[in-house]
Every structure is written in C-alpha cells, then in structure tokens.
Image: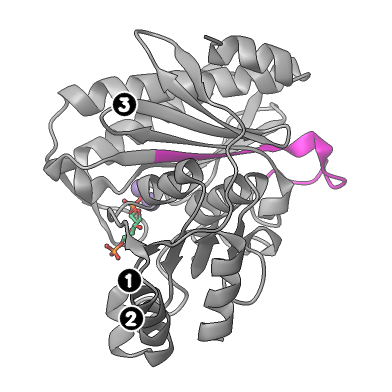
Amino acid sequence: MQTLQSFLQEKVQDEQLQSVLVTLSESVKAISERISTAETCKAGTNNEYGEEQMALDILADKLIQEECEKNEQIGLIASEEQPDEIWLGDGDFAVSYDPLDGSSLIDVNLAVGTIFGVYDLKLRSDANQDKSFVGLKGDDLEVSMIAVYGPRTTIVLAIDGEVNEFTLGEDEFYLSKSELKVGEGKMFSPGNLRACSENLKYLDLVTFWIRSEYTLRYSGGMVPDVNQILLKGKGIFSYPPYSKYPDGKLRLIFECAPMAFLMEKAGGAASDGYKRILEKTYEKIDQRTPIYIGSKEEVDRCSKYLI
Ligand code: AHG
Ligand code: MN
Ligand code: MN
C-alpha cells in the first residue's frame, strides 16, 4: 500500500509544495483525533457570516493555523472562521480553508469535513504585488484537498491532473482509490430545497429528478455530499440562491472553488448557472456563490432549467 508521503514524493516535483501538503495532512490527523474525543457543544460565538460556531469549528481552525505557522513555505492563509486573511511571512504558498464543513451535523454524529485550497503565488505574473486571495480565481489553484471525517477519515486530493483518495490508518494516510472519474448517473443531492417555495424553476428541476427516478443522497454537509459524487463517479449537488441568500449560501474561496477544482479534475463540472465556478474572480474574502456541481450533463441541466 502506498503512503501519502511516498505518493507526494513521486508526483510532486516541488519539494516546497510537498511540505505544504504534508502540513495540511498533519492538521487533518489532529482534527480527526479531536472530533472523536472533544466536546460537541456550541462555542457561544458567531462567525463572519453570522453563523453560530461550534467549539470544534474553533478548535479545527486553530489546529490548521498552528500547523501552517510551523511551515515557512506558507506565506498567507485565510479561514472561513476568521474575518481577514492572515500574512504569515515570505512563503510562496497561500492556503484557504473551511476548517469544519457541516459542523451543525457534529452533535448528531454525521460525517463532516475540511476543505483546503492551495495556491502558488510565485507562479502569478503579478507575484510581487501585495499577497492576497482577492484577485485570484479557482483556475489559479495548484492543489485542492478535502478531508472527510466519517466512519473512516479520508482525504481526496487533486494534484497533477489526477484525483485520488487516501485513508487514514494507524498514523499514516494510504492510497485507497486511484484516479477517480465522474461520469453520468442518476443520483441527486438537492441543497436548499426551501428555495422551491419561491423559485418554481428549481421546483421543476427537482421534480424532473424525482420523476426520472434518481436516487436521493443528501447528508446536509457539502463535503460528504460532493465526496460521494467523486467516489460513486456520478451525481449532482445543487445549492441555488433564494431570498435569504441572494448570492447563494456557500462560500466561493473556502468551499466552492476548491470543490470545483476537484470535480473538474475528475472529469465533472461546476457552475454558478452562468459560468464555471473556477472562472469567478475573488472580489472579497467572504464572497458567496450559487453552485451546481457533479456530472457534466447534470450541471448543464441545472443551467438550462434555472437560467
Ligand atoms: P459550514 O458548516 O462550513 O458553515 O457549511 C455548511 C454548508 C454545507 O456544508 C451544506 O451543504 C450547507 O451548509 C447546508 O446548509 P442548509 O442546511 O442551511 O441548507
Ligand atoms: Mn462549509
Ligand atoms: Mn465551516
């Protein structure tokens, strides 16, 4: 069985990038350990988006930041749980993260996840300008990675044009599924169904999926839901806007762009209904977007029904 470390040594020429990915996988190990032992209570605080934070949201955020601070290759970080991006030093790599996606599912013991986006700022033509995520876009991603904390702890990593799954053993990640590919198939994860109350086009789309006998697979966490599409090799996850979230709920930098990068590298697609998620330039750290992500035909169908 191949370890993540030996996989990275084989596939990633850039030793600095290798070390960044090892750092992120170490933070996943630490979070995995704490999820199974720490309190699942609320923190009594709200994040930048006015969402109630769980104690584990804050702990996971702290664990990742601490790991990133130890690696001098990482010069810039931004977290969904913090209002501003943070400059760490001269390192060329920038890392965005949603420390714990689906954290409201923790107290009922459903799967949750972490989402990372890794950018190599030295590859940008304007590399000497101020370091910031603002001005970048998903197409600038070098690597994206999700971790799923379920019955097993897994990582799905898009690097070097390939998407692979690794599973945490005693103390190491091992390659568990190679070269994930997303094709077509009847499985749907329809997020924000409350939008059907005011958007009859979304109601029509969901009705199409139901009448066509698609299998419903929806957990309430974007990471486990999209991870399922990647692993089953088919399906669609949707999260349209509605009056409470006119730009959608999910965050472009922390959630949608890294997920879109994984999906495209696996042969699927991701769109906001008008354009590829990866083409959307980051205008602000807390930018949100609608998202339709999964099998290509399904993503096209979303645009056709909704726009
Ligand atoms: P987070 O826990 O990082 O705030 O993200 C939760 C997200 C996403 O994982 C999920 O798909 C979506 O919120 C579900 O939201 P609603 O249940 O409000 O529709
Ligand atoms: Mn999230
Ligand atoms: Mn989160």
Residue 110: say if magenta. no
Q: Which residue position holds label 1?
A: 192
Question: Mark 3 and 2 residues: CB-CB less than 8 Å, in contact?
Answer: no
* 121 lies above or below 205: above
Name which residue lies at 36% across and 45% down: 224
Please state which amino acid type lies under the numbered disc 3: Arg
Spatial separation of the CA atoms under disc 2 and disc 1:
6 Å
Q: Residues within 10 Å of mark 1 (few under 14, many from 20)?
A: some
Give whichever of discs 1 and 3 has the lower sequence position: 3
Question: Mark 1 and 3 residues: CB-CB less than 8 Å, in contact?
Answer: no
Q: Which residue position holds label 3?
A: 152
* 247 lies above or below 279: below
Taking the image as shown, residue 277 lies to the left or right of residue 55, namely right
Between 164 and 247, the residue placed more toward the observer is: 164
Image coords of residue 293 (percent x, y): 52, 60
Please state which amino acid type lies under the numbered disc 1: Asn
Q: Is mark 1 within 8 Å of ligand 1?
A: yes
Residue 128: say if magenta. yes
Image coords of residue 50 (percent x, y): 29, 62
Q: Which residues are magenta?
A: 114-132
Give whichever of discs 3 and 2 has the lower sequence position: 3
